[in-house]
Amino acid sequence: MISLKTKNFNLMILYSIMFLILVWLCYIFPYTGDDWAWGSSVGLERLSSWFENYNGRYAGNLAVLILTRCRFVKAIFEAICLTGIVYLIVPKRQNRFFNTVVCFLLIAAIPKFLMRQTIVWTSGFSNYTIPVVLVLIYLRYCYSLLESGDPPGNNKFSTSVAMLLFAFVSALFMEHVTIYMLFMGAAIVIYTFYKYRKVYTAYLSYFIGVAIGAAYMFSNGAYRLIASDADECKYRTIAQGSGLVSRAIENYFKVIGKELFLSNFILNICIFFAVVSLFWKYREQIKASRFRMIAIFSTIMVEAACVYSFVANIFMIFLRKNIGSIHFDGIITLLFCFCLILFCFSAVFDRTLKKKLIFLVFSIAIMTGPLLAVTPLQSRCFFPTYVLFCYFVIECFGILKMKKQMPIVALIALFLALFNLFRIYIPIYQVDIQRVDNVQAAANSGRTEAELSHFPHENYLWMAMPDLGPMWEERYKLFYDIPLNVKLKEIDYKEK
């Protein structure tokens, strides 16, 4: 038998190694796209007007202003957040080492389009990843409600004030996450009052803080301009009235049907095994249950959807071909989500686990709801739902008996995923440093034209080149302190 002390030591070593690896990885991610604006005088101009008519993501904007000004600070902070996500998700129960490895694997194997917009891209990280960490912190605080049914019971004034401030800041990052926080905060206050006939000030303070934060966020003039279709950016819109239904259908089938579920290759494999394992664990109870047909049907449908996702991703990776239409993919995603809810209700007989899984699935639904009405709708909007699906998998694995070789298998998979990331991003980092040096050298020598090389593996970066017009080229020059009169000439990447 391995002692608890030894297990904790192994876990501490794992977290330490992964933190250092993540620091290295986050350091070599280049600044791209809007990072050039935030890290230059453009970002300071936005700050001087307190982001008037820009957006209400005040905390996210301040975060990116800081992270784009020091690469090492960025690397440390991002590694803390990513490690924190794993720590906050993995429960302190059996299989903890295995679950921690799996959770790091799911972060390392995040889909390409999602990763490049929420982890690699500093602007995306600031607005989409940080609020997920803050949501998980509050969920961990409320964990006892689902774990034992008992609230923390902390009604101290200092705790309530801290919770209000924490909630206020948490609400100033991403609009649909803020809306989810409102629903979650209200639901917890109502649940505890209904069950205990008592108002817990810490929970109430969180809800009030989120409500104040949401009001402050949406008071920014940008949302009024978007609602009246007068936004100067033009690409940001929100559907209203009769157009809401058509926008919801379009968003769902064009984006949500794929990004919410089908694109999550490795995650869906884990969901497959989690659902199969739970069905096998509870097979005797299912056999005796009056809902056994629903349990069997929902299990088969969830597994079939996961298999379809696996096949679809294989076709896309190796043949660059979609095997289904966007409408068929959307139907598969809808069927998966519906049957996953049925599975939780009919096939999970551990009451604590059932409450957690149902809470997570409905959280995913609420987080997705606002996305039906807005544009642009990009992969980055689905990082919160991706993490909640990871949470779902880890909760399932937490009550299962694992064979001794499973942690080794998971470690090998994690090593391969990390190796793949470094294989991609080390050459990108080398070219990033080299091309900036070349442009600055050309400027220093008095030349008015400088070559700007494309990156290798450029589809793993978001807006890697300042080729969308003179505005982006100017921001790139401001960020790297390149004279504005120097003309940038794009050249193809040439491998040495």
Image: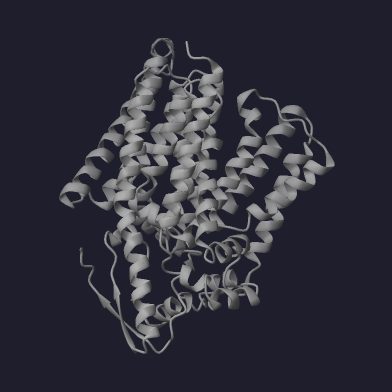
The reply, left or right, for residue 15 in relation to residue 336 is right
User: In this view of the protein, which residue sits in the foreground, 170 or 149?
Assistant: 170
Q: Is residue 302 visible?
A: no
Whether residue 115 is situated above or below residue 443 in the rendered picture: above
**Residue 425, how many percent across, how many down?**
34, 55
Image quarter of residue 190: top right
**Residue 32, how many percent across, how many down?**
41, 66
**Residue 306, how many percent across, how many down?**
30, 35
User: In this view of the protein, which residue sits in the foreground, 448 or 183?
Assistant: 448
Whether residue 473 is situated above or below residue 420 in the rendered picture: below
Whether residue 295 is situated above or below residue 327 in the rendered picture: above
Quadrant placement of the C terminus: bottom left
Q: Residue at x 42, y 32 (%)?
A: 101
Q: Residue at x 49, y 62 (%)?
A: 123
Farthest residue in the left direction? 319
The reply, left or right, for residue 72 in relation to residue 291 is right
The reply, left or right, for residue 48 in relation to residue 68 is right
User: In this view of the protein, which residue sits in the foreground, 32 or 147?
Assistant: 32
Total labels drawn: 0
Image quarter of residue 18: top left
User: In this view of the protein, which residue sits in the foreground, 411 or 306?
Assistant: 411
Q: Residue at x 39, y 38 (%)?
A: 105
**Residue 283, how many percent across, how many down?**
38, 13
Farthest residue in the front direction? 445
The reply, left or right, for residue 28 in relation to residue 453 is right
